[in-house]
Image (cartoon, rainbow, N blue to C red):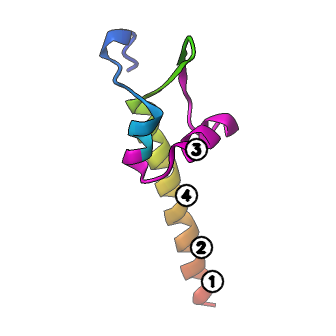
Amino acid sequence: MVDRDASNVGLLTASQVARKLNICERSVFSLTKSGELPAVRLGRAVRYALEDVASFILRNKDGAEAEHREEDDRGDE
């Protein structure tokens, strides 16, 4: 179920996202520009919904695990 109340959405700055992902701010902006990490624009300010950051982490975690499983399967041949 989607919560339509925007006041409950936690927003993070690029700096906060960078610290959470252990990457530099430039990488956060690159991910945003490529469309991999959605952003909320408030005038000139760019913010990131905590939910979007969590989804980004899960998408990349699942991809990394699938890639690792494929490598393991190839090793069995």
**Picture coordinates of residue 17, whole percent (x, y):** 42, 40
Q: CA distance from mark 4 to mark 3?
A: 23 Å
Amino acid type at circle 3 is Arg
The amino acid type found where label 4 is placed reads Gly
User: Residue farthest to the right?
Assistant: 34
The quadrant holding residue 9 is top left
Characterize the local packing of mark 4: few (<14), some (14-19) or many (20 or more) Cα atoms within 10 angstroms.
few
Residue 11 at x, y percent in the picture: 38, 24
First in sequence, mark 4 or 3: give its number.
3
For residue 4, side relative to residue 45 (left or right): left
**Residue indicated by mark 4:** 63
User: Dot 3 lies on which element?
Assistant: helix
Residue 8 appears at what percent x and percent y?
Answer: 30, 16
Q: CA distance from mark 3 to mark 2?
A: 31 Å
Disc 3 packing (10 Å; few <14; some 14–19; many ≥20): few
Is there a contact, CB below 8 Å, between mark 1 and mark 4? no
Q: Which image quarter is the N terminus in? A: top left
The residue range painted magenta reads 19-40
**Count of marks overlaid on the render:** 4
Which comes sooner in the sequence, label 4 or label 2?
4
Distance (Cα) linking label 1 and label 3: 36 Å
Disc 1: which residue: 74
- The residue furthest left is 8
Q: Nearer the viewer, residue 3 or 9?
A: 9
Of the residues tagged 1 and 3, which is closer to the observer? Answer: 3
Task: Tell me the kind of residue under disc 1.
Answer: Arg
**What residue did someone put label 2 on?**
70
Determine which residue is flagged by label 3. Answer: 26
Residue in the image at 38% along x and 31% along y: 50
Q: Residue at x 53, y 72 (%)?
A: 68
Q: Nearer the viewer, mark 3 or mark 2?
A: 3
Mark 3 and mark 1 in contact (Cβ < 8 Å)?
no
